[in-house]
Image (tube, helix red, strand yellow):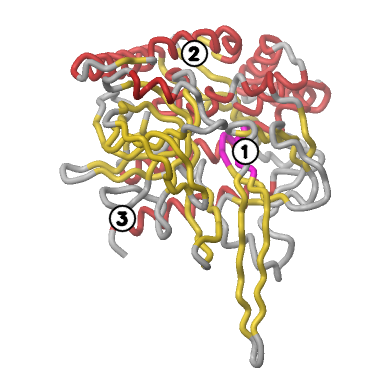
Amino acid sequence: MNPLELLVKDILDSTQKLDEKFSRNVSPGYPVYGLHILPGLVFILKHFVLVIRRYSAEEYFSHYDHLILLLPHFISIRAVRFSGKQLIDPNSSFIIEKLEKQKGKESRIGKDLPGSFITQGKLTNIDSSFLQMFTPMFFGLIRPLLLKDKYEGIVLPSPLSLLSHEYFSQNSSKRVFISPCSLTVLLKNFQYKREFQVLDMQLKGFLSKGATIFGTDSSGYVVNEQIDIFLPDEDFADPRFREYATHGIPVLTHLLGIMIFDEKFPLIRNGSGGYFLALQEIPYPLSAETLAICGKLSKFAFRSPLSQGREYEHYYAIECEAHEKSTFQQNVQRYLSSIRRKNNAYSSLEEQMIGEATQKYFSSNFYILEKNTLKLLAPPIIMLSLTQGYDIQEVYKKINKLQQLSESTGIEAQIEILQLRNSDPILKTILPHTQGPWKDSFTTQSQLAEKWKLKYII
């Protein structure tokens, strides 16, 4: 294999390992929330199999609703295949009590679909309109990646958001990799298309050929790359897309959408045919992006005297030095401002920063400044606090007490930690999730970027 093939294999292997961890960590006792990336948007997965026997051949053709969901407990985006008599509301999100790759060993669909699960009916509709407000913050933690050298740039998905989708077209089954994400773009060269092929759909809308996207690392030094972006002129898409082309100048904005790759590999390079399907303009989650790119995990650990000294680790936040955060954000904002000026572009980023400021007003309790270190509480803690009605300051005080106790090697402190874990109702609910796959998701993305010297697309 050449280096690029090895990199793609690493991404697919990492996705599979995360899938396995997600399956093991969802149950009726430990359910997770699945929030639509865009309420009302449901793909149809069409699976076709031809089974050839000795004297006959049989065709199997299956349809599933393919629900693309943000799983905040795991800071990941995955898909759920749904088919059955149970009524579900496509505009509503879900509580999920089971995630499995396939029904059984003999199933003809599932194992070979990275990022796609079934729930065997173990999902329940919920009113998620309040929770939906916080999705840009979670999207900010899930970053697409960029392999950049002096010759070309290659866009790659994060293992946190990679799934395969199937559809039927021209009498054959097609399988593609897709990756929902958000990114900052400079849109230009708008062309109106009355029939643009998106999977098995013909959509009308605007194609921005060679739109500019931006990649960086913890230094905040920004590089550019080009990608085609399609902005649908359809009911499900953001109506502001129609305004972009009327400005008559380039547009700098932050969009939620889906990377759609070619049929063989999850990558977009010059001439590959991949593109970004825009869905909605969203607030630019710069604070969350900063922690995704510059941050590291915060944890406390203790040894249980009742379990032969076994060590328990709890990952409760993502942290970043305050001065590093300021330097990074200043470099990024300065660069994007220069891009706007050089291209005489209309920019909605300023409005989106106001949107993020409004979001941070609601989510400010989740960001904690402590000893010149900025911390964002772990996504499962955020979700449980929002859904269970916990006072986040009280939650943090309890966690902070455990952290302080864990710094002592005395057996009295270890016993007190054990007593608090087992008796405090809030800690009993939250702490099991701080040992869950969210930490694996975060480290998988950061270690992949470091290993292959990849940029994070902002």
Identify residue type, mark 3.
Answer: Leu
Residue located at (49% from left, 64% from top): 170
In the displayed structure, does residue 276 sit left or right of residue 382? left
Report the magenta residues as a range.
67-77
Q: CA distance from mark 1 to mark 2?
A: 22 Å
Q: Position of residue 153 (x, y in %)?
A: 25, 43
Give the SS element for disc 1: strand
Asked if the stretch drawn in magenta spans residue 70, the answer is yes
Q: Position of residue 49 (x, y in %)?
A: 61, 71
Is 364 drawn above or below residue 410 in the view shown?
A: above
Callout 3 environment at 10 Å: few (<14), some (14 to 19), or many (20+)?
few
Q: CA distance from mark 1 to mark 3?
A: 29 Å
Q: Is residue 211 visible?
A: yes
Q: Position of residue 23 (x, y in %)?
A: 68, 49
Of pointers 1 and 2, the one earlier in the residue sequence: 1
Give the SS element for disc 3: helix
Residue located at (81% from left, 39% from top): 29
Is 15 drawn above or below residue 191 in the view shown?
A: below
Give the SS element for disc 2: helix
Residue 4 shows which numbered tag? 3
Callout 1–callout 2 Cβ contact below 8 Å: no
Callout 2 environment at 10 Å: few (<14), some (14 to 19), or many (20+)?
many
Q: CA distance from mark 3 to mark 2?
A: 36 Å
Residue 356 shows which numbered tag? 2
Q: Which residue is mark 1?
A: 69
Q: Nearer the viewer, residue 347 or 94?
A: 347
Q: Position of residue 303 (x, y in %)?
A: 66, 34
Q: Is residue 415 visible?
A: no
Identify residue type, mark 2.
Answer: Glu
Residue located at (53% from left, 23% from top): 136
- Position of the C terminus, as image quadrant, is top left
**Which one is in front in this view, the residue at disc 1 or the one at disc 3?**
1
